[in-house]
Amino acid sequence: MIPRGSGDDGGRICRRPLALPALLAALVVALLYSCGPLGATQPSATPLDSGIRGSVRLGPTCPVERRDLPCVTPYVAVLVILDVDQREVARVTSAAEGRFEVALAPGDYTVTPTPGGDPFPTAPPRAVTVIPGSFVEIQIDYDTGIR
């Protein structure tokens, strides 16, 4: 109900200013805008100086291995990095020469090589602990199934 005048205002309707509700609405909008899109993560203020790097190899690539003629070759593969809760935190593809690197916060991870075919080549997952300030060096070996 809108209050009526007391008689000395000529019976005009008195209206309260809407400044407070408008101010509160503007404040809520400003706070939500400053948080960024819902579900988005803010970039780290400092670049990570730790993670995992290494190489991916495929072998054997010949039916008979000799000491002077290794039967392995670099391999381009997709590696999925999982945290301790088995959530994907990164995905990296090794380069043509088999090298890869991914920056990660210190912690325990599992490097899960994706299958290269059906059923070969395959590689087993690797548990890795990343320590602050360094990159852990690992090697992923895909098995071709050649025997």
Image: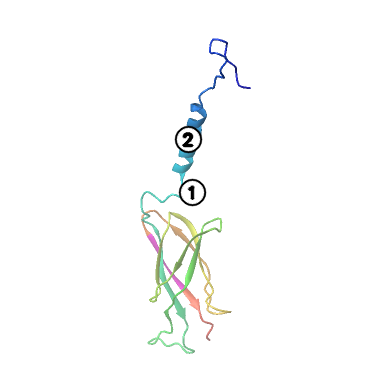
Q: Nearer the viewer, residue 145 or 67?
A: 145
Q: Amino acid at mark 1?
A: Pro
Q: Nearer the viewer, residue 94 or 137?
A: 94
Q: Residue furthest top?
A: 8
Magenta stretch, main secondary structure, is: strand
> Mark 1 Cα within 10 Å, few/some/many (few <14, many 20+)?
few
Q: CA distance from mark 2 to mark 1?
A: 17 Å
x, y percentage for residue 137?
Answer: 40, 65
Queried whether the magenta region covers residue 139, the answer comes back as: yes
Quarter that holds the N terminus: top right
Q: Residue furthest right?
A: 1
> Mark 2 Cα within 10 Å, few/some/many (few <14, many 20+)?
few
Q: Please give the name of the residue rendered at 43% of the width and 84% of the height, measured from the top-left corner.
A: 71
Residue 136's tag is none
Q: Is residue 33 above or below residue 77?
A: above
Using the rendered view, name the quadrant where residue 52 is placed. Answer: bottom left
Q: Earlier in the sequence, mark 2 or mark 1?
A: 2
Q: Is residue 146 above or below residue 28?
A: below
Q: Is residue 145 above or below residue 90?
A: below
Q: Please give the name of the residue rendered at 45% of the width and 87% of the height, measured from the top-left corner.
A: 65
Residue that badge 1 annotates: 37
x, y percentage for residue 57?
Answer: 44, 76
x, y percentage for residue 18?
Answer: 51, 27
Residue interval drawn in magenta: 135-140
Using the rendered view, name the quadrant where residue 134 is placed. Answer: bottom left
Queried whether the magenta region covers residue 138, the answer comes back as: yes
SS class, disc 1: loop
The mark lying in front, picked from 2 and 1, is: 2
Q: Is residue 9 above or below residue 38?
A: above
Residue 26's tag is 2
SS class, disc 2: helix
